[in-house]
Image (cartoon, rainbow, N blue to C red):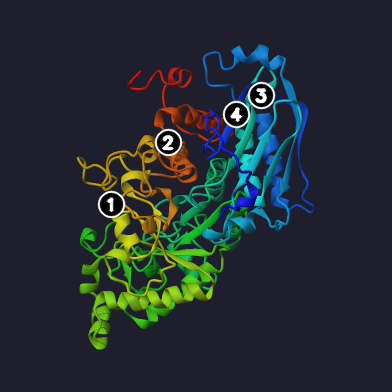
Amino acid sequence: MVKASLFLAAAFVVTPALALWPQPRNLQTGSSALKLASSFHITTTIHNAPKDLHDAISRTSSFLKTDKLGRLVVGRGSSDAAVVSRARALPSLTLSLSKGAKINSIAAEAHKALDSRDEAYMLHVPADGSGATMTANTTLGLFRGLTTFSQMWYAYGGDTYTIDAPWIIQDSPAYPYRGLMLDTARNFFPVTDIKRMLDVMSWVKMSVFHWHVVDSQSFPLEVPGFTNISTLGAYSPSSIYSASDVADIMNYAGARGIDVIMEIDTPGHTAIIHEAFPEHVACPEAAPWATFANEPPAGQLRFALPDTAKFTADLLAAAAKMSPSKYFSTGGDELNTPCYDQDVPTQQQLQATGQTLFEALSNFTATTHGALAAQGKTPVVWEEMALDYNVTTLSNETLVMVWISSENVAAVAQKGFKVVHAASDYFYLDCGAGEWIGADPNANSWCDPFKSWQKSYTFNPTANLTEAEAALIQGGEHLLWTEQSGPENVDPIVWPRAASSAELFWSGPGGNGSMALPRLHDVAYRMRARGVNAIQLQPEWCALRPGKCDLTS
């Protein structure tokens, strides 16, 4: 967590700076114009600074030259020209680690356990023409500060400038887990698209990419020792993430301050494993599918069988070795009991051992989570494992993702589990697009209506929780289930909507949506300048006239 020694004991006035997202938690600005000198450069005092920090400096320097974002006002900054022409020039930004800080790569810091990550930074940009300085305890903190610095500047008439100097920022996140989930099983996403998503996540200080990599529809993950599952279970040979692809994604994410939490959902959502290991799957492609699964095709692991438990534990352990994260998700949602009621091997095993189905699930979980623990991983599960299935073998260190309803958070916290907010009533990006199931022309999506950025921005992470329960909240994430999404439309579905939770879990709840909207416009315009097809939030007339399109205007 944040080390107090980094910060000066001072009271700061929080003022809304249009360009910054997420809003720094402690911010003071002035009213002087300041431009970047033609020779502006970023340096570091860190001896043998890690490569990913040097790369981050290079990317930031490039953004400062190429963003060229005109201020979102009528005239796009033309009214600033006179004062900017007379402004002092900022010659440099110098990055330093606090005295005694250990020098690690950005990736190494990003891969630490949630309660060990330090993302705090201090940034001072003077208005008098002297150099700017940034200090942090970690390279990860410096990287977050670089992200802030890159957002401070507008462009007009050949100048890159701010009209809000000086800047004094002391910043750190309210919550360590600020994530985005992408499902790559319903539809496949090439590595280039995942990398683009990681880039955008880093621009809004997201810290976790929750990769729901496989599901019943396809198994695109090539797991060493289990490659026949992807060979037989991927949509095509070109729709597979090889071990080298996974390593590439992990490295790319880590260098951008993002931890990748992989998910292999078990024991449900595993029909595709039948293609390679039919002995481990109950009711494969049973019909009617709606009786045996939440989505087609039906099929679930025979978790009551010891051989299946061992197979699953070995599979998860092999996949976990591919990831440097301290976390790995085993899912655990939407178990279909009718599937097991009619599965002869499952019923024979239950009768022979005298177990109930959920007692067998507890034993299965002990085996699979034990395999993860042996790899140094903390398990992540969906809320049903804690609330619905009476699984007695979950460690209190387990991260529980609450997705069915935000109203279920208190029940999970009351059991003493750490919570990640993933509520469908606030954070599901696929809601409101109509029904994707065929032969159902009048239906809507199950989680209607569409969840706007304004809706998620109003979320209170600690609503109805005691102080002790609130301390269990790790943060939250937006989620994209991809029944109707692919590389063709992922950008506008996700961005800039998902940036709302990035600010919520960095800056804390209670933000004013009307004041946030102009800044989110800035975010979206900057995303598009960097090649991301972020959707428009309003007509440009509104974007150039903050507040004029509010309902109360």
* Mark closest to the chain's N terminus, 3 or 1: 3
Distance between mark 4 and mark 1 Cα atoms = 39 Å
Say which amino acid is labelled 1.
Answer: Glu
* Mark closest to the chain's N terminus, 4 or 1: 4
Say which amino acid is labelled 2.
Answer: Gly
Q: Is residue 85 left or right of residue 383?
A: right
Residue 29's label in the rendered image is 4
Q: What element carries label 2?
A: loop
Image location (x, y in percent) of residue 353: 27, 87
Residue labelled with disc 2: 511
Residue toward you, 275 or 139 = 139
Say which amino acid is labelled 3.
Answer: Tyr
Residue labelled with disc 1: 407
Residue labelled with disc 3: 161
Q: Image quadrant for the C terminus?
A: top left
Observer-side mark, 1 or 2, equals 2
- Residue shown at the point (25%, 88%) measured from the top left: 352
